[in-house]
């Protein structure tokens, strides 16, 4: 790999996230944007970033309520903790999940104009109670699922192993994940971005902290700005 390739998650959550993605695209560093369906700011800088010929994913959202009056812990199925527990045991694998996934995928295709892959906010698309439905929708739309197979991302690695066991190789593509250890030094960040596996890297940057002013209850907020500055420091 001669240049870094990043996937920016949470497109549409705030203008600052979209602007960070556009900056990466203008450097030739952007593999794709993962779009939150029905997000308020999806159109901000959209045409500019699509002009850079990047891929578009549907960032399946079952754990973040887009209503700005509600905290991030509230969802249309309950709290994040409740849904994680229920989905982990498969209790919510039902028609409601399949319908919601289809609706979000259709929204992204209609409003963005293309769709190249499916992933999930909080990696919800890989949970045992959701994976089968996600795979079915992806197969119908002839797109792969995204699987973060980064062993350094310990909280997700079990899901990645489960998904790789449950899916055929043709059903997914792999990527890495920029974590806290990676941004501690420029050397670490460059090693992840220019990885020898030549895999894209999922990132969560923002040009500024605009979440409070836009009434977005984001748990990362200021960390996104730090990540953006660290990427620029290491790679420019």
Image (cartoon, rainbow, N blue to C red):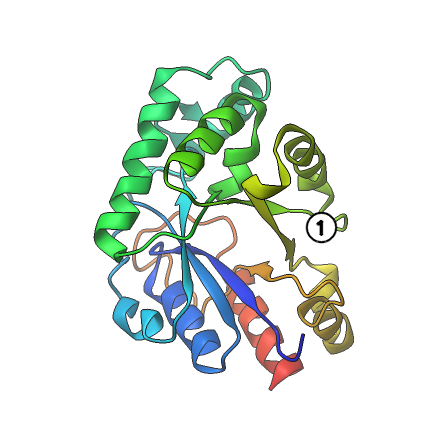
Q: Nearer the viewer, residue 184 or 193?
A: 193
Reply above or below: 106 against 166: below
Q: Is residue 196 visible?
A: yes
Which residue is tagged 1? 150
- At label 1, counting other C-alpha atoms closer than 10 Å, the crowd grade (few under 14, some 14-19, many 20 or more) is some
Query: How many labels were placed on the picture?
Result: 1
SS of the residue at dot 1?
Answer: loop
Q: Quarter of the image containing the C terminus?
A: bottom right
Residue 234 in picture, x, y percent from top left: 66, 80
Answer left or right for 159 relative to 90: right
Q: Is residue 38 visible?
A: no
Residue 12 in picture, x, y percent from top left: 33, 56
Q: Nearer the viewer, residue 216 or 162?
A: 162
Residue 117 in picture, x, y percent from top left: 45, 49
Reply above or below: 27 against 85: below
Residue 108 in picture, x, y percent from top left: 29, 48
Q: Nearer the viewer, residue 214 or 197?
A: 197
The part of the image, by quadrant, that contains residue 45 is bottom left
Answer left or right for 79 relative to 37: right
Q: Residue at x 72, y 64 (%)?
A: 182
Q: Residue at x 42, y 46 (%)?
A: 59
Answer left or right for 142 relative to 182: left
- Residue that sits furthest to the bottom in the current view: 236
Q: Residue at x 66, y 40 (%)?
A: 156
Reply above or below: 171 against 114: above
Q: Quarter of the image containing the N terminus?
A: bottom right
């Amino acid at each position: 790999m001669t240049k870094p390739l990043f996937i920016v998650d949470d497109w549409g959550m705030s203008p600052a996230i979209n602007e960070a993605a556009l900056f990466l695209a203008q450097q030739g560093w952007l593999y794709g944007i993962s779009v939150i369906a029905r997000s308020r700011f999806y159109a901000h800088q959209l045409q500019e970033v699509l002009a850079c010929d990047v891929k578009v994913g549907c960032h399946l959202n079952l754990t973040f309520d887009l209503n700005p009056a509600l905290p991030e812990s509230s969802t249309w199925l309950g709290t994040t903790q409740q849904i994680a527990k229920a989905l982990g045991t498969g209790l919510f694998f039902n028609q409601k999940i399949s319908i919601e996934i289809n609706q979000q995928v259709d929204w992204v295709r209609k409003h963005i104009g293309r769709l190249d892959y499916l992933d999930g906010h909080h990696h919800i698309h890989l949970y045992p109670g959701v994976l089968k439905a996600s795979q079915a929708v992806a197969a119908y739309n002839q797109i792969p699922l995204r699987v973060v197979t980064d062993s350094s991302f310990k909280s997700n690695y079990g899901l990645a192993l489960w998904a790789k066991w449950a899916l055929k190789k043709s059903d997914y593509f792999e990527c890495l994940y920029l974590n806290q250890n990676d941004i501690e030094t420029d050397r670490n960040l460059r090693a992840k971005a220019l990885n020898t596996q030549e895999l894209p890297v999922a990132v969560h940057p923002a040009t500024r902290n605009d979440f409070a002013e836009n009434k977005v209850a984001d748990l990362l907020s200021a960390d996104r700005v730090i990540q953006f500055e660290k990427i620029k420091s290491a790679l420019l």
